[in-house]
Each structure stands twice: as structure tokens, then as C-alpha cells.
């Protein structure tokens, strides 16, 4: 006998999962597991303090355009691997992009240089751009526009639709769908920028949250420095794919309690022969939903890959231009606005404004509103509300870029009316009950100014929502914000802007080996050679005519072979929608078959009437809509002095007559029942006056 010990192992090694990366963000130390690049005004911080909630927050500054922050794993991973991530967000905003991507560790490709625009115009929903130099763009590439003198053209997120010439391209849509209809131009200003789907990595795949809809994303795959392969949607327009929501779950609603959790998790299987993105609800047994599968373009399997999350404010994003020092109307609808810094507006520019203390006379300008005139670098006029004499303070104004309104960028509808600071906690009383915020959200206070003077309250900056009670909002400082010295309740104006936060609760990456396995041959019928299979969901089984069909729903198309069975019922069913649809055999509640001319007992009726005149009498009232009265038998006797005729009426329409001799009982069963039209009474009448008693029986059916 030969014994094989550990000192003489077989020269065979079998393995599957051979590498694991697990991150639950109980702590976060940049440079250890992750590297980070944080743009000015952005926040990358660990959060969560209860119910096991811990998550990394990547929060974008709502005050600056053209900024990028990112975190990236220190470790690199070999293909193949499975990835799962608990991602959730405070809101979704067009013009802000959060890219969750696996990218190769190679040197990045040459970055795209912004292109100067020589001419730009739009006819309804087609934007035509001519560039000073050849653009090198292709249909499907992700771009944006900024710096055009008419800000309606500054679309933060577009996709190239066509390339008529080397210096011209058109665009009609982007992640926000079809662009607004505008006919204007040509103008000779502005620039085109590229929205890289993977930060110029030569190989990789990405899922980008770039739509305002929390249940959409765009997917991309790249191989060996080629073009991005679009994972769905319309190549020359909106690349959106539907997926499970990125909305956060607030596990508990209590002051100073931060417990956001993901609703869903997002998964990636990255293999040498396919890329597959999917999603599933967290903490459930629900099957995953396949979203994107690509087999024709696959990242290079010989490269190593890092996980990277990029958070971008596009260059065409609408951001506040200036704080409002004061706004005044003198018996007119024209308001004069004074700003703290040069506003940069020109006559005809479209703007929005938020946060003025007097919300009665200076309600938020939520729609794009044209500047009426320019007084000087820090003063302009605009039509604002009704004609009154009033002055107020605080808030901000924004130049609207490409229909990118502040209402979609996190600006809260309520304005500040009173502010208090105590022990580092800022309490704001709003113009109305605060809405659109949750405890734990990050916000910016912007344009907070003292009522009566317009002097800054010194509370502008980034804060976390600590508590909300109707009109009272408690905030605590985050990021680089430092709470000012304590001060008592002070009347003032100002705006609250909700920040767009990506929250990452967990990430798991498992390297695995794809193995081919063959079962050992077994004798026929040996159950030991069978692999157990668990069926997920409700299977739909289709059999041929040689097999047996399963149960078929009533009103479904006729199967082959015919389903066998009966349906217990105490009410007639509705008529089938089409000839040839399956109708189950109806049976009484105890299983007795119901055969014509008899109907369900519950649908039967008996009626009687005493007739003496030629005026019609209802023997059975009208049935419900869609149902008809069927009469199967009647009994009558004429006790009058002369022969008369009994007339059966469908409403007012005669359907049948029967002669009734004097004192002769008559019984009649209809071989084919008489039927009224739907929802019509069954009436009886006499041809001449007399004395007749009549009984009738029937049923109600379609």
C-alpha cells in the first residue's frame, strides 16, 4: 500500500477564489488602502455613526464648475474577478458625474484639449458646432460646451450625433435626453470639452451616474486604447440604461444620527470573454438583474486593474455667480440687485435666484429669467414678482447654463430668516418648513446676510444636517468650514444648497479562476451523478404537442395541448377579449358542471308581474353594464273576460308574443332563450287590456 503524505503531495492544485478585497469603510486612511485626490470645495470623508452604518462620502462642491475628485485602490487586480458595491446618493444632478470604474494601471492616454468654437448655432433641437481646428470627434463621444456668450448653448452634458466635416459636428441629446428647443445663433465664442468615460485609461469599464434620474446609469467598455464601447441607450444621444435606484435609505430619523444605507448593490463580472454589469436589492434573496453584457469589446486580460471612483462637476455646470447684498423695488416689478462681487452678466442673460429673506416680494426665481439691464459690474435689474416697494437681503444669483436650473442642482425652496450659533451648532429658522433634506445630508449655506444691511452673517460654507423640526434646521460644520463665534438669533436671508453626495457602504472584489469541470461517468440512473439545480423565480415551461401543458390563465391564448380543468365560480365571468381565447369550464362551488340553458345558481333570477293595461311593466330590471338578461321559461294565466296577447319587450323593442286564452294556464320553455341587449330591462305588456298574471325565469350573463 502506498501512502501519500503532505511531504509528497500530488503535483495538482485546484483553486477558484484566490484573492479577496473587502472594504466596509469602518475607517479610511488615504495612502493605506486608498489614494485620494480632493478638489477644492469637495469633501471626501468617512461618515455614519449608528446601526452599523459606515460609509465613505464623496461630496461635490455646488459652487464650482470643472472640478474632479477621486479615490483609487492602492492594490491592483488581475482578471477575472467579481465585484459588488453598495453605492447610494443624496440626489442625482445633470452636469455632475460619478464614475465607478475598473481601469488598467497603464499610463493614461493623452488628455483631450478643449476646442475653441468658431461658430455655434441651434435650430430647434439640433446644435451645430464648428471648431477652429479639426475636432477629431466621433459619433457617440461624450462632450460638453462652456464659455459661449449666450449661456443657453452651454450644455454641461452632450453626446456627438453626427460629423458632417472635420471641423463640424452636431448634437441633439445627452444623458438628460433631448436638448431644449432653441433657435438662435450663430455665435463665435465658447469651447468644447470631452467627458472621459474612464479618465483616459486605455483599458477598463465604467458605470457612470450622470442622469438626474436615480434609476439610470451609463455603461462603457474600452480595450487597448480604442473608443469607448457604449453599453446601452442611443449611441448618438442618451446612453441611459435602467437600473435599480441609487437612493439612500435613512435607517433611522433622529437628531445627530447618521445611518444611511444603500437600497441596492451593483455588481460587475469582468472576465476574459465578457463584461457583465448587474444589480440586486441589498440583504435579500432576490435574483440579480442583468443590465449590460458585452462580449465583442473586452479589456485586455493581461493587464492589472484598479478600482477608481471619479466625481466630476462638468465645466458647463450652473453654479452661483454672486451673493445678493440687497434687492430693491420701488413701486414696480423691476428689481435692482446688488451683488458682493462682479456678477458677469449681460443684458438678456438668463438667471435664477434663491434665498432672499423676503420670500413674499422676492420669491425664488426658479425659472430662467432674463436680465433687464446692467447698471454696473455689481448691479443689474430684472423683472421680479409683483409691483411693490420693498427691499430685502441675502441669497445668490446664477447664470443658467444650458437650461441647467438651480432647482435641479440642489437649491432648497426655503430661505433663511433667522440664524443662531451656539457651541458650534448653527440653527436656521426657515421662511417655511424645511423640505428636501434628510438628517445626515451635506449642504452649503450660501449668501447668508444680515437683514437691513446685507453684511455677511459669516456662516457661508459646508455643513451637515444635524436635525430638522419643521422650520428649524440644525447644522454642524464639515470639511474646512469652521463655525463662527456664538451669536444670538439674528434676522437675515440666505440660501441652502443640497450637495450631491456619493456614499459607498461596501466594496468586495474576488479574484477567481474559471475552471472547466467534467462529471465522472456514472451508470444510467445513478443519482450520485446528478448535479442539484435550484430554480430561481417562477419558471415558464413550454411543452410540445407530445408533452403536457401546465395551467393557463383564463383569457390567455389557447395552448397546445388544451389545458384540462374547471373553474369554480359563483358569478359569471367577463366575456373573453378575443375569439379563440381559453375559457375555463365553469362549475358551481361544489364542482357540478354548469350546462346551457342553465347558469350559475347565483346568476339566476325569477320575476313576476300583474298586467291589466297596455302599459309595459318590468319583469326583470336592467343588468349591470356589459351583462344581458336571458329568459328561459315563463308561466302565465289570463283571468280576464277576453283573449289577449302577452308581449315580451327588450326595453321598448318587441321580441316575442304569446296568445293567452281566458282561464287557460300557459307554460312555455324557450328552446333558445330570449336575450336582451346589455344593461337593458326585460319588460312585458298586453296587446289589449285585461287581467293577466305572468311569472318568468332566466339568468344574467354577458
Image (cartoon, rainbow, N blue to C red):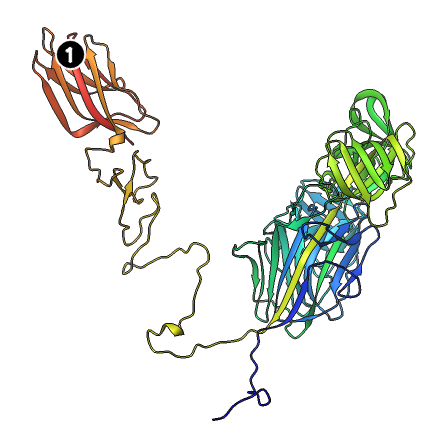
Q: Give left or right: position of 630 versus 274.
A: left
Residue located beneath label 1 in the image: 692
Residues packed near mark 1 inside 10 Å, few (<14), some (14 to 19) or many (20 plus):
many
- Residue 510 vs residue 126, the one in the foreground: 510
Q: Where does the image place residue 296, in percent across and percent down from the top left?
A: 57, 67
The vertical placement of 78 against 457, above or below, is: below
Q: Where does the image place residue 54, in percent across and percent down from the top left?
A: 71, 54
Q: Residue placed at 24% from the left, 14% from the top?
A: 617
Q: Give left or right: position of 487 versus 174.
A: right
User: Regarding mark 1 in the picture, which secondary structure is present there?
Assistant: strand
Q: Image quarter for residue 651? A: top left
Q: Residue placed at 40% from the left, 74% from the top?
A: 529
| Whether residue 130 is visible | no
Tally of marks: 1
| Whether residue 223 is visible | yes
Q: Residue placed at 70% from the left, 52% from the top?
A: 503
Q: Where does the image place residue 443, in percent across and percent down from the top left?
A: 78, 43
Q: Image quarter for residue 386? A: top right
Q: Give left or right: position of 70 versus 7.
A: right
Amino acid at each position: 500500500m502506498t501512502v501519500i503524505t503532505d511531504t509528497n503531495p500530488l503535483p495538482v492544485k485546484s483553486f477558484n477564489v484566490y484573492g479577496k478585497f473587502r472594504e466596509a469603510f469602518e475607517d479610511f486612511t488615504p495612502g493605506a488602502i486608498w489614494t485620494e485626490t480632493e478638489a477644492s470645495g469637495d469633501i471626501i470623508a468617512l461618515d455614519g455613526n449608528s446601526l452599523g452604518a459606515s460609509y465613505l462620502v464623496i461630496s461635490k462642491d455646488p459652487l464650482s464648475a470643472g472640478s474632479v475628485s477621486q479615490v483609487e485602490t492602492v492594490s491592483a487586480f488581475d482578471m477575472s474577478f467579481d465585484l459588488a458595491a453598495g453605492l447610494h446618493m443624496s440626489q442625482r444632478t445633470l452636469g455632475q458625474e460619478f464614475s465607478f470604474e475598473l481601469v488598467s494601471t497603464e499610463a493614461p492616454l493623452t488628455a483631450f484639449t478643449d476646442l475653441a468654437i468658431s461658430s455655434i448655432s441651434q435650430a430647434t433641437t439640433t446644435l451645430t458646432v464648428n471648431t477652429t481646428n479639426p475636432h477629431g470627434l466621433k459619433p457617440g463621444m461624450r462632450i460638453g460646451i462652456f464659455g459661449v456668450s449666450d449661456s443657453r448653448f452651454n450644455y454641461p452634458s452632450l453626446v456627438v450625433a453626427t460629423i458632417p466635416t472635420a471641423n463640424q459636428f452636431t448634437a441633439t441629446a445627452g444623458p438628460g435626453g433631448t436638448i431644449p428647443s432653441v433657435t438662435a445663433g450663430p455665435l463665435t465664442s465658447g469651447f468644447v470639452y470631452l467627458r472621459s468615460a474612464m479618465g483616459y485609461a486605455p483599458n477598463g469599464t465604467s458605470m457612470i451616474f450622470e442622469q438626474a434620474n436615480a434609476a439610470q446609469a451609463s455603461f462603457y467598455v474600452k480595450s487597448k486604447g480604442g473608443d469607448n464601447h457604449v453599453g446601452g441607450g442611443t449611441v448618438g444621444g442618451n446612453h441611459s440604461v435602467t437600473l435599480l435606484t441609487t437612493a439612500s435609505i435613512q435607517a433611522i430619523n433622529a437628531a445627530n444620527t447618521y445611518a444611511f444605507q444603500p437600497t441596492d448593490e451593483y455588481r460587475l463580472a469582468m472576465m476574459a470573454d465578457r463584461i457583465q454589469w448587474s444589480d440586486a436589492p441589498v440583504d435579500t434573496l432576490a435574483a440579480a438583474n442583468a443590465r449590460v453584457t458585452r462580449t465583442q469589446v473586452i479589456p485586455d486580460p493581461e493587464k492589472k486593474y484598479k478600482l477608481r471612483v471619479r466625481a466630476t462637476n462638468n465645466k458647463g455646470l450652473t453654479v452661483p455667480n454672486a451673493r445678493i447684498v440687497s434687492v430693491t423695488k420701488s413701486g414696480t416689478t423691476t428689481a435692482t440687485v446688488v451683488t458682493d462681487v462682479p456678477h458677469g452678466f449681460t443684458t438678456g442673460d438668463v438667471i435664477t435666484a434663491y434665498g432672499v429673506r423676503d420670500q413674499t416680494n422676492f420669491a425664488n426665481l426658479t425659472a430662467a429669467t432674463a436680465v433687464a439691464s446692467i447698471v454696473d459690474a455689481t448691479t443689474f435689474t430684472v423683472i421680479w414678482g409683483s409691483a411693490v416697494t420693498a427691499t430685502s437681503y441675502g441669497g445668490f444669483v446664477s447664470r443658467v447654463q444650458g437650461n441647467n436650473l438651480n432647482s435641479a442642482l440642489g437649491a432648497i425652496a426655503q430661505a433663511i430668516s433667522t440664524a443662531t450659533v451656539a457651541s458650534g451648532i448653527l440653527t436656521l429658522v426657515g421662511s417655511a418648513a424645511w423640505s428636501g433634506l434628510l438628517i445626515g445630508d451635506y449642504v452649503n449655506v450660501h449668501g447668508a446676510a444680515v437683514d437691513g444691511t446685507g453684511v455677511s452673517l459669516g456662516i457661508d460654507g459646508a455643513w451637515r444636517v444635524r436635525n430638522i423640526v419643521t422650520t428649524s434646521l440644525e447644522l454642524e460644520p464639515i470639511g474646512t468650514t469652521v463655525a463662527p463665534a456664538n451669536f444670538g438669533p439674528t434676522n437675515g436671508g440666505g440660501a441652502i444648497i443640497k450637495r450631491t453626495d456619493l456614499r459607498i457602504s461596501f466594496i468586495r472584489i474576488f479574484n477567481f479562476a474559471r475552471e472547466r469541470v467534467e462529471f465522472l461517468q456514472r451508470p444510467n440512473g445513478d443519482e450520485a451523478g446528478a448535479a442539484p439545480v435550484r430554480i430561481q423565480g417562477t419558471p415558464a415551461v413550454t411543452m410540445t404537442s407530445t408533452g403536457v401543458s401546465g395551467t393557463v390563465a383564463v383569457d390567455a391564448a389557447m395552448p397546445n395541448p388544451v389545458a384540462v380543468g374547471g373553474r369554480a365560480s359563483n358569478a359569471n365571468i367577463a366575456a373573453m377579449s378575443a375569439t379563440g381565447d381559453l375559457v375555463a369550464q365553469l362549475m358551481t362551488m361544489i364542482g357540478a358542471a354548469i350546462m346551457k340553458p342553465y347558469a350559475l345558481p347565483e346568476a339566476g333570477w325569477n320575476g313576476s308581474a300583474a298586467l291589466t293595461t297596455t302599459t309595459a311593466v318590468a319583469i326583470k330590471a336592467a343588468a349591470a353594464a356589459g351583462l344581458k338578461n336571458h329568459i328561459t321559461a315563463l308561466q302565465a294565466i289570463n283571468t280576464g273576460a277576453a283573449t289577449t296577447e302577452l308581449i315580451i319587450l327588450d326595453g321598448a323593442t318587441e321580441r316575442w308574443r304569446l296568445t293567452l286564452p281566458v282561464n287557460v294556464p300557459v307554460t312555455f320553455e324557450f328552446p333558445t332563450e330570449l336575450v336582451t341587449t346589455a344593461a337593458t330591462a326585460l319588460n312585458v305588456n298586453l296587446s289589449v287590456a285585461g287581467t293577466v298574471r305572468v311569472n318568468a325565469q332566466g339568468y344574467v350573463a354577458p
